[in-house]
DNA sequence: TAAACAATTATGTCGGACAATGACGGCGCA
DNA sequence: TGCGCCGTCATTGTCCGACATAATTGTTTA
């Protein structure tokens, strides 16, 4: 490496994480073009690394790549958003169920509880970025508790990030309702009630689906 | 491009498909190293393209990449195989349910029926590669019918290929049982019975799980 | 005004170069 | 003789430069 990269993951990782960070920060918006040369300049890495990062992002569905055309931050149509939410209903339900089944083992409870408390922190709720991170941590804790590696590997590609970013401008679900949902999921998992945990996670996603369905056309692409 | 590539997907696609093909053909076995230089020679493409292909394969979980070490065809441990099967139970169930709900629209029925007939062809069942392809087509037809793009994008990364390849040497499930399973799924979808379709798909995966659980340690890694 | 053509832009791919790291084997020391 | 250190080797990680190729846009001409 000509220049040492501070991150352990290497140059492509710097770009990869940088773009995602930029997405949540609003630096990159859905529909925006991501020109390789620009990223090369911004992140000070070779074009190969930029390319690799874009491929990773494309693999997770965050950006769309068309042959001989620039990569663009994916912007969801109404149908795509609906599909993602339906998929997440199934996936999160599965995840919550697994977590409830295995809640006994290890320090899982502590990690989930910690994440849950962070979500309920007023200060965190004010900051879009911090709140998003907190929710990610909550979901990640549930995933880890479930202990299904295949599911853990698959989840990032489901498109949850995309939803959050695209609809950031809208309060998709009433805050109180959302927090109640999280509480229900948390308590069901904590109680080891797998059926209730799955139901709660699914209900949460269904609520989100209803809220997204009522958004104006301006919130969607195509 | 210095040399024109016959495939429309470009050089990385040639390598990507070539490796998967090689996996099913037995040219590459689980645990085998995939050295970039070798692939560069074999497929006659630049190292960059090989790298890109390996990243795609890694994104789908087909190969494992460790920093500064060669990419390795992933070999599943017992736990990993179990996780994948559990995940596929959920995913395939979801897929079958969606297909049953939307069976009315378009030429979906024809495509599924065609794939189902191919699976039941004796000649196809003799050839591991053709049989694998036929099953893929059956699942793909169900996915397409379901019409959930997010699910379609996600499925390849779930790890179904990995299971097939790793346990190819063992008759994981009695042929007759397997065909019965497929028939049950097919008929439920055809009848538009979403609940039964989901149950049939799940049952199928659970049967596979039981069969895999009884395989000897030699069939697994680690 | 519309079709053909030219310039611009950005990606797709290759090749070479060199640093960084991990694996392996041999050497020296206890 | 055995064990740990050290160099070599194989291979990946990254950058750079070059050029073909294709999409986009602008321009000229019939």
Image: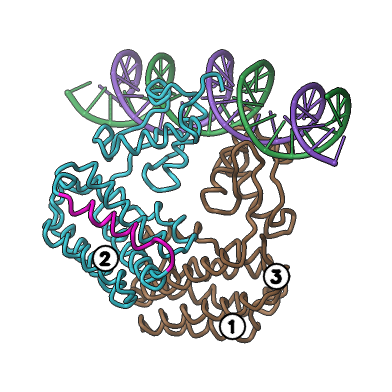
Chain colours: A brown, B cyan, C purple, D green
* Disc 3 target residue: A217
Are discs 2 and 3 both within one chain?
A: no
Image quarter of residue B116 = bottom left
Q: Chain of mark 2?
A: B
* Disc 2 target residue: B186
Say left or right for B152 vs C9: left
| Mark 3 or mark 1, earlier in chain | 1
Q: Position of residue B19 (x, y in %)?
A: 36, 35
The part of the chain drawn in magenta is B105-121
Q: Chain of mark 3?
A: A
**Does B4 appear above or below B68?**
above
* Disc 1 target residue: A179
Residue sitting at x 49%, y 71%: A86
- How busy is the neighbourhood of tag 2: few (under 14 within 10 Å), some, or many (20 plus)? many
Residue sitting at x 43%, y 60%: A152
Say left or right for A203 vs B34: right
Task: From the image, give the main secondary structure of the stretch colored magenta.
Answer: helix
Q: In what element is the residue under mark 3?
A: helix
Quarter in which the N terminus of chain A is drawn:
top right
Q: In what element is the residue under mark 2?
A: helix
């Amino acid at each position: 490496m000509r220049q040492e990269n501070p991150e352990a993951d290497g140059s492509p990782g710097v770009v990869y994480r940088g773009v995602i960070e930029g997405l949540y920060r609003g630096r990159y918006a859905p529909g925006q073009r991501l020109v390789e040369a620009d990223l090369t300049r911004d992140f000070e890495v070779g074009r190969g690394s930029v390319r690799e990062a874009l491929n990773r992002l494309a693999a997770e569905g965050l950006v769309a790549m068309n042959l001989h055309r620039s990569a663009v931050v994916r912007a969801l149509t109404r149908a795509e958003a609906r599909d993602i939410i339906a998929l997440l209903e199934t996936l999160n339900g599965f995840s919550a169920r697994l977590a409830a089944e295995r809640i006994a083992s290890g320090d899982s409870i502590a990690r989930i509880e910690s994440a849950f408390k962070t979500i309920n922190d007023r200060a965190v709720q004010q900051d879009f970025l911090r709140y998003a991170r907190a929710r990610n941590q909550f979901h990640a804790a549930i995933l880890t508790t479930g202990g299904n590696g295949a599911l853990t590997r698959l989840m990032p590609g489901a498109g949850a990030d995309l939803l959050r970013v695209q609809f950031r401008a809208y309060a998709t679900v009433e805050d109180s309702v959302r927090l109640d949902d999280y509480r229900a999921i948390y308590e069901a998992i904590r109680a080891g009630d797998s059926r209730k945990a799955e139901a709660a996670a699914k209900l949460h996603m269904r609520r989100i689906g209803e809220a997204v369905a009522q958004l104006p056309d301006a919130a969607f692409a195509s």
